[in-house]
Image: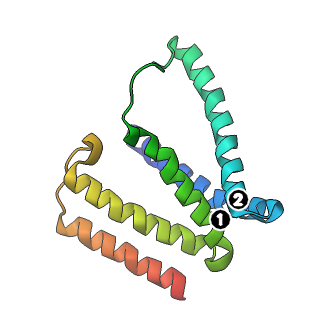
């Protein structure tokens, strides 16, 4: 049952990304600058996460250790997210939401296979099996079909 719930959460998160792209595209048009739309999107997300942090801190009776030193690489996540959001805002009106999502998933899968293979940032190492490679190639074929047809 837990596996089903985690899979459902992943599907909902993916749907949120797909829905976010056209919303942010319209925001970019309204503001006249795609980068401004990305900034507003991140600011709204920061406010939402701040509220969630307060709720979870109260539920768990704990607060984050803000004084803990963090390597610079730990801050790259937000920067990487800003690349994605800005690219989605720029690409969605040009190639469509489905193609943006298809290319995004292909990039995520490719990076995920590499991350799994080398164990980047402590991720459990998983070998590149024939099934994983074939699955990635099938997804890439799907990307081409979504974009071309």
Snapshot quadrant of residue 115: bottom left
Q: Residue at x 54, y 59 (%)?
A: 84
Above or below residue 120? Residue 19 is below
User: Would residue 48 be seen by someone viewing this image from the given angle?
Assistant: yes
Q: How did the renderer colour the structure?
A: rainbow
Q: Position of residue 65 (x, y in %)?
A: 45, 18
Alpha carbon distance from label 2 to label 1 = 6 Å
Q: Residue at x 56, y 70 (%)?
A: 100
Q: Are marks 2 and 1 in contact (CB under 8 Å)?
A: yes
Name the residue nearer the viewer: 29 or 70.
70
Q: Position of residue 81 (x, y in %)?
A: 52, 52
Snapshot quadrant of residue 144: bottom left
In the rendered structure, find residue 89 and report the number of the disc placed on it.
1
Q: Residue at x 25, y 70 (%)?
A: 133
> Crowdedness of circle 2 by 10 Å Cα count: few (<14), some, many (20+)?
many
Above or below residue 40? Residue 25 is below
Q: Position of residue 52 (x, y in %)?
A: 61, 28
Snapshot quadrant of residue 107: bottom left
Which residue is the extreme one toward the right? 30
Side of 120 relative to 13 (left or right): left
In the rendered structure, find residue 24 and report the number of the disc placed on it.
2
Q: Secondary structure at mark 2?
A: helix
């Amino acid at each position: 049952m837990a596996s089903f719930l985690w899979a459902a959460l992943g599907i909902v998160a993916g749907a949120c990304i797909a829905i976010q792209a056209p919303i942010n595209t319209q925001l970019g048009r309204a503001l006249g600058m795609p980068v401004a739309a990305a900034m507003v999107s991140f600011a709204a997300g920061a406010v939402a996460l701040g509220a969630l942090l307060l709720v979870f801190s109260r539920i768990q009776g704990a607060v984050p250790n803000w004084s803990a030193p963090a390597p610079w690489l730990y801050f790259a996540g937000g920067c990487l997210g800003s690349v994605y959001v800005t690219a989605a805002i720029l690409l969605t009106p040009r190639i469509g939401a489905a193609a943006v999502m298809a290319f995004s998933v292909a990039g995520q899968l490719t990076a995920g296979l590499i991350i799994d293979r080398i164990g980047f940032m402590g991720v459990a190492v998983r070998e590149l099996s024939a099934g994983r490679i074939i699955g990635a190639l099938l997804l890439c074929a799907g990307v081409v079909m979504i974009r071309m047809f």
